[in-house]
Amino acid sequence: MNKQAIHINDTTLRDGEQAAGIAFNVEEKIAIASLLDSIGVHELEVGIPAMGHEEAESIQRIANLGLNAKLLGWNRANLSDIQASINCGLDRVHVSVPVSDIQIAAKFKGQRQLVLDKLRDAINFACDRGLSVSVGGEDSSRADESFLLEVAQSAQEWGAFRFRFCDTVGVLDPTTTYKKVSYLVSHLSIVIEMHTHDDFGMALANTLAGVKAGAISVNTTVNGIGERAGNAPLEEVVMGLKYLYDIPTGIDTKRLVEVSKLVSKATNFPVLPWKAIVGENTFAHESGIHAHGVLQNPITYEPFAPEDVGWERRLVVGKHSGRHLLLSVLQQHGITLGQAEIQSVLDAVRHQSVKTKRSLTVEELLSLVPQS
Ligand SMILES: CC(=O)SCCNC(=O)CCNC(=O)[C@H](O)C(C)(C)COP(=O)(O)OP(=O)(O)OC[C@H]1O[C@@H](n2cnc3c(N)ncnc32)[C@H](O)[C@@H]1OP(=O)(O)O
Ligand SMILES: O=C(O)CCC(=O)C(=O)O
């Protein structure tokens, strides 16, 4: 596999915000864009200029920040959408066309030729105005492969610099993704970008499979927010590339938790504790056997060091804890117990944990230690 650095095009501010129930205000969009830029994300899909009003204002204000990241506006294959992007001060536009017959029937009267005509007009309009044009094949995964290739090759010929392969309803698995993306890569000279959804929990796996097949740009969202089950999470893609494929992104991974917290607050949706990379349990150890291993060597139960993403390791006492963890925690508080005493504290910990349905605080643990 080619190990060239992968380009991250984060769409938290476009597809991420399309999640039902999420609506960022201007200040939140600016704060998210600025933080993503400061950790080194290469490109930001900042929104949909054709929505007008507050959305256009936030895009305009982000464009005026002078960020290092390239900024991209999402557009339908409509000249008025592209004009709205220009009016926001963007010089890079993404033009989306439906490519599966299911989508073409719903949007373009079932006419494949209309897809090509509208795309050609949109690319010409944008290129004539000096814009860089990225093209997206909506529902690429369910499209007829020869028509998908025809659209992508036409986009390349008309001047697009990139083609986005969209698994719009998240129906691919990694093997199929690899085959489909390899086919496109072998017939195109422009960059292929992956855009995946998590309807079957495959968004990360399919993004990585696309990279393996030769895609060198990927669409992500912070915490995986996005339409329905969401998109490929930024934090998972960056850490997956780094540790599973040894592929650099140049992103400051130590701030991924900070980014996750900002976006979680702005969305008003909490991150689940067991969410990969950024969930608060990802470096918490309670179970006896795990804690025993981690106390000897953290790599027994951690794939990488917590500091790598901005977390700290937590050893917590609860229902599944064992003697070694208990002894270690108590020792930190100057308490040494014998075998019989430690077993009775452990029994009390289990009882209290079930009663309160959570781990114990240190104070609660200490209160269970018999006074000598
Ligand atoms: C897979 C994706 O995520 S695609 C991105 C989807 N994102 C969103 O929809 C969020 C933002 N959307 C919006 O604010 C609005 O839908 C707008 C401003 C884009 C359009 O709003 P409205 O004019 O009210 O139209 P509405 O959303 O009801 O319908 C969509 C229209 O776009 C057309 N359309 C859909 N996709 C495309 C496309 N790729 N290129 C051109 N036209 C398209 C539809 O056929 C329909 O056209 P019609 O009005 O002539 O029937
Ligand atoms: O960019 C496109 O073409 C569509 C992107 C998208 O959000 C999707 O297909 O899920």
Image (cartoon, rainbow, N blue to C red):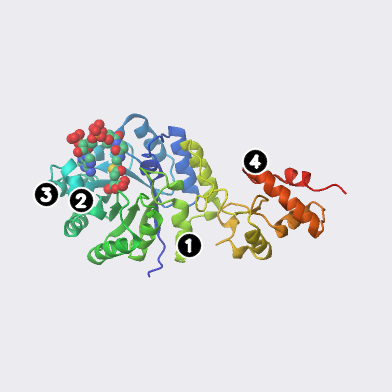
Q: Amino acid at mark 1?
A: Lys
Q: Which numbered tag is attached to residue 113?
A: 3
In three-dimensional space, the C-alpha distance between marks 4 and 1, rounded to whole angstroms, equals 39 Å
Q: Which residue in the structure is indicated by mark 1?
A: 242
Image quadrant containing the N terminus: bottom left
From the viewer's perspective, tell me whether residue 116 is left or right of residue 323: left
Q: Position of residue 36 (x, y in %)?
A: 47, 47
* Residue positioned 42% across, 49% down in the render: 69
Q: Say which of 63 and 321 sits in front.
A: 321
Rendered image quadrant of residue 326: bottom right
Amino acid of disc 4: Thr
Q: Position of residue 169 (x, y in %)?
A: 30, 48
* Residues at marks 4 and 1 touching, judged by CB atoms closer than 8 Å: no
Q: Is residue 287 left or right of residue 19?
A: right
**What residue does disc 2 label?**
100
Query: Residues under labels 3 and 1: Cα distance?
Result: 42 Å
User: Which numbered mark, 1 or 2, is in the foreground of this view?
Assistant: 2
Element marked by disc 4: helix
Percent position (x, y) of residue 266? Answer: 48, 37
Above or below, comparing residue 10 to residue 245 in the picture: above
CA gap, disc 3 and disc 4: 63 Å
Q: In the orientation shown, which residue stands out farthest toward the bottom? A: 1
Q: Mark 2 and 3 residues: CB-CB less than 8 Å, in contact?
A: no
Circle on res. 356:
4
Per the image, label 1 sits on a secondary structure element best described as helix
Q: Secondary structure at mark 2?
A: loop
